[in-house]
Image (spheres, coloured by chain):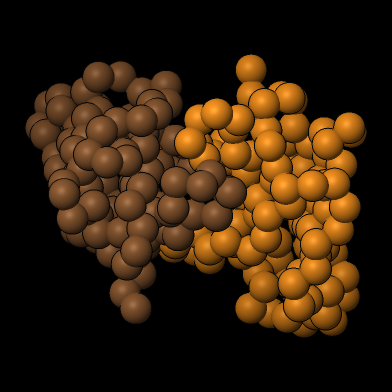
Chain colours: A orange, B brown
Amino acid sequence: GQSLEQPSEVTAVEGAIVQINCTYQTSGFYGLSWYQQHDGGAPTFLSYNALDGLEETGRFSSFLSRSDSYGYLLLQELQMKDSASYFCAGPLYNQGGKLIFGQGTELSVKP
Amino acid sequence: DAGVTQSPTHLIKTRGQQVTLRCSPKSGHDTVSWYQQALGQGPQFIFQYYEEEERQRGNFPDRFSGHQFPNYSSELNVNALLLGDSALYLCASSLPSGTGELFFGEGSRLTVL
């Protein structure tokens, strides 16, 4: 089957750094995406790793190791507004970009 | 530039009824995907439309059907509603390049009583 595993909850303090890990169980993914969702609203795209290595976008970075079937999202200089659910998602080869989502990690940022 | 818009935002139905949800994709996007998100879960892929045809389908029964119109907007229809169909239904648009970047609407929250 195809599945992605991530921690259900993470708590951190304002200004800190937090890492959200994602491991997956299929070889069918051709990259790894990350999405943020506030309070059941529209998920918003954060990053996409097509190749192994680190991608940096402002305070957010994402890493992928296809050999280890593992990736992570790194959030730096945490702000209260970063409190949200974060989903890793894998687009499947030859399936027109169909995404398989993980169950989500709820991040709580404390003052 | 309008993003993805969905209607209605909230609706309540009873078991056995039918529902139609609507979606207008982001300007310039021709591919529309529908996802179901139960409370506390990740979005589950229902199906994807491109050039007015269903291109991919997830593990959902035939009660779930859809349509894409020539202007790329789309509808999701669910027949014979079950209590378990209560969820947030998300529409996402994209270009057919399949890079993993989807633009989501705010969703339609369906409650089945």
Quadrant position of residue A10: bottom right
Quadrant position of residue B63: top left
Q: From what the image shows, is residue A82 above or below residue B84? A: below
Residue shown at 50% from the left, 59% from the top: A43
Residue shown at 49% from the left, 54% from the top: B102
In the rendered structure, the answer to whether residue B59 lies left or right of residue B18 reads: right
Residue A108, given in percent of the width and then of the height, sits at 70, 66
In the rendered structure, the answer to whether residue B104 lies left or right of residue B83 reads: right
From where the camera sits, is residue A59 visible? yes
Q: From what the image shows, is residue A12 above or below residue B103? A: below
Residue B110, given in percent of the width and then of the height, sits at 26, 46
Q: From what the image shows, is residue B87 above or below residue A49? A: above
Residue A94, given in percent of the width and then of the height, sits at 55, 29
Number of numbered discs visible in the structure rendering: 0
In the rendered structure, the answer to whether residue B34 lies left or right of residue A95 reads: left
From where the camera sits, is residue A12 visible? no
Residue shown at 22% from the left, 30% from the top: B65
Q: Residue furthest left?
A: B17
Q: Quadrant of the C terminus of chain B?
A: top left
Residue shown at 36% from the left, 30% from the top: B55
In the rendered structure, the answer to whether residue B104 lies left or right of residue B85 reads: right
Q: Quadrant of the N terminus of chain B?
A: bottom left
Residue B108, given in percent of the width and then of the height, sits at 28, 54
